Image (cartoon, rainbow, N blue to C red):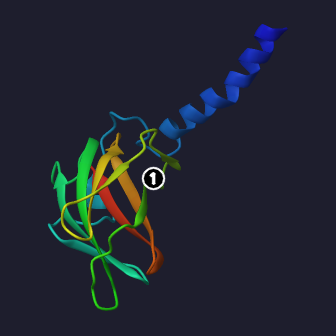
């Protein structure tokens, strides 16, 4: 009886994992992805995203451009009004694949930099090919805001 209940509990999980691989055409991590056919950001040093309170510049990415696996990004966060560096912010980074409706099992570590307003994002894990939307949520005394970087990771 317990064995049957265990197998019944596993069935939805295994079907969900299979759905990611079949519903979207390139769900497995070895399928070809044509990034030229996707709408995504083009990586450049200083790529800026503006929210309603903050501006975020992607100062560097290792590897550059962002690629499959663990990435490390350095961002510069400033206020929109006056462009003052934002120090002491609480930052949460969430990589997510919209076509597959999943994220990554790896938490992104955020480390304040030595330059005011600079933060290092460690282990931005883009583990499979396709379009990843990485949301950067920031909270400080200036307010709360979020920006999204959208990169296509080639096969």
Q: Residue at x 79, y 12 (%)?
A: 4
Q: Please state if 82 lies on the left or on the right of 12 as rendered.
A: left
Give the quadrant of residue 88.
bottom left
Residue under label 1:
96
Instruction: Give the answer, above or below, for where 66 lies relative to 125.
Output: below
Q: Position of residue 54 (x, y in %)?
A: 37, 79
Q: Residue at x 48, y 53 (%)?
A: 99
Q: Residue at x 45, y 77 (%)?
A: 141
Instruction: Give the answer, above or below, for where 113 lies relative to 53.
Output: above
| Placement of the N terminus among the 4 image quadrants | top right
Q: Secondary structure beneath disc 1? A: strand
Q: Is residue 146 visible?
A: yes
Dot 1: few (<14), some (14–19), or many (≥20) neighbours within 10 Å? some
Q: Position of residue 83 (x, y in %)?
A: 27, 86
Q: Position of residue 153 (x, y in %)?
A: 28, 49
Q: Is residue 154 visible?
A: no
Q: Residue furthest bottom?
A: 82
Q: Residue at x 43, y 81 (%)?
A: 142
Name the residue nearer the viewer: 7 or 72.
Answer: 72
Give the quadrant of residue 68.
top left
Q: Please state if 153 lies on the left or on the right of 19 as rendered.
A: left
Q: Residue furthest right?
A: 1
Name the residue nearer the viewer: 88 or 16.
Answer: 88
| Placement of the C terminus among the 4 image quadrants | top left
């Amino acid at each position: 009886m317990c064995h049957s209940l265990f197998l019944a509990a596993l069935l939805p999980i295994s079907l969900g994992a299979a759905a990611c691989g079949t519903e979207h055409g390139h769900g497995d991590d070895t399928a070809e992805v044509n990034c030229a056919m996707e709408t995504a950001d083009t990586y450049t040093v200083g790529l800026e995203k503006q929210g309603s309170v903050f501006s975020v510049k992607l100062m560097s990415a290792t590897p550059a451009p962002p690629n499959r696996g663990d990435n490390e990004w350095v961002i510069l966060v400033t206020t929109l009004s006056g462009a003052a560096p934002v120090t002491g912010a609480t930052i949460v980074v969430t990589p997510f694949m919209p076509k597959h409706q999943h994220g990554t099992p790896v938490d992104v570590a955020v480390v304040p930099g030595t330059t005011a307003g600079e933060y290092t994002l460690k282990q931005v894990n883009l583990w499979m090919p396709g379009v990843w939307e990485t949301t950067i949520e920031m909270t400080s005394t200036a307010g709360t805001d979020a920006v999204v970087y959208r990169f296509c990771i080639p096969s």
